[in-house]
Amino acid sequence: MLKMKKGLIVAVVAALFMALAACGKSTETSSPSGAEKEGKQKITVGTDAAFAPFEYMQKGKIVGFDADLLDAVMKEAGLDYELKNIGWDPLFASLQSKEIDMGISGITITDERKQSYDFSAPYFEATQVILVKQGSPVKNALDLKGKTIGVQNATTGQEAAEKLFGKGDHIKKFETSVVAIMELLNGGVDAVITDNAVANEYVKNNPDKKLQVIEDPQNFASEYYGMIFPKDSELKAKVDEALQKVIDSGKYAEIYKKWFGKEPNMEGLKQQQ
Ligand code: ARG
């Protein structure tokens, strides 16, 4: 009898110890990480890093105007973030599924996109341009009639081409702007329609390729880039506030000068805000 009691006590004490140990463990695994304790969670930002000078890969790192601006904005907002190169079409799918919290990728704010996503205040003015080989007879957008045009899939470049000439085989869609330009060099398309700063950057960095940029403000309207969020994201307000501070402090102008070698014209942007 006595022996049995002793055995029971041992068993109860052992069970208690085990329960305590388990307790200790479980509080440990559920304790918040450093960042969470300070109220910070890590924001995942997606991009398509084949769009110099806005975002491109250099020695395994994503660099460019957008990368610098994002860094300044996130620092200002006190947010931890990671910028991931996920590609253009996946960027939109990942926003839809909320696998990423936001995107920055030279993304034009359009009415159509606004139906499915939220945008920050505009941070950059752009327009579409035509990239052709030097000596091409193409002098403006209308001269592209009957020619094959390369675009990055699902971009405003594609939209601009379709608006002028309708959908069809004359418009060849590529995964990145870089691939579209390669196709122009290979003679697979007669022209590429892409964003002005990207076309200018390519021509500047590759003089041996003998390409030229044709502007046509009559046929290509102004566009404005925004950072993009899933619909009703709480991040938008924080990012807008921080972006405004980055602009007001002169940090935006500093980043702009680093990538474009001149002062930004903030008037056009302000009118859009
Ligand atoms: N601005 C154009 C658009 O929004 C092209 C952007 C492409 N950006 C990129 N990183 N590939 O449709």
Image: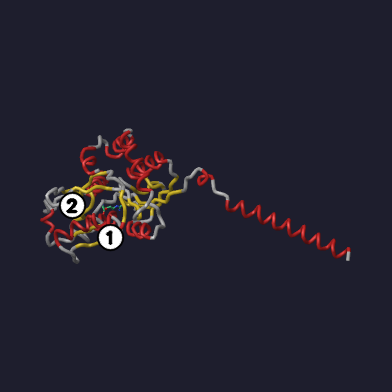
Q: Secondary structure at mark 1?
A: strand
Question: Residue at point 41% right, 47% down?
Answer: 61
182 and 227: which is toward the camera: 227
Asked whether, in this view, residue 267 is left or right of residue 254, the answer is left
- The kind of residue tagged 2 is Ile
Residue that carries the numbered disc 1 in the rendered image: 174
| Earlier-in-chain disc, 1 versus 2 | 2
Q: How many marks?
A: 2
In the depicted view, which residue is nearer to us: 157 or 30? 30
Q: Position of residue 38 (x, y in %)?
A: 50, 43
Could you tell me how far apart the alpha carbons at marks 1 and 2 are, in whole angstroms? 16 Å
Q: Is residue 262 above or below residue 87?
A: above
Q: Amino acid at mark 1?
A: Phe
- Residue situated in front as seen by the camera: 170 or 86: 86
Name the image quarter holding the N terminus: bottom right
Give the quadrant of residue 231. bottom left
**Residue at the top extreme, as displayed:** 249
At a point 45% along the width and 45% down the height, the residue shown is 80
Q: Which mark is residue 130?
A: 2
Q: Secondary structure at mark 2?
A: strand
Say if disc 2 is inside 8 Å of ligand 1. Answer: no
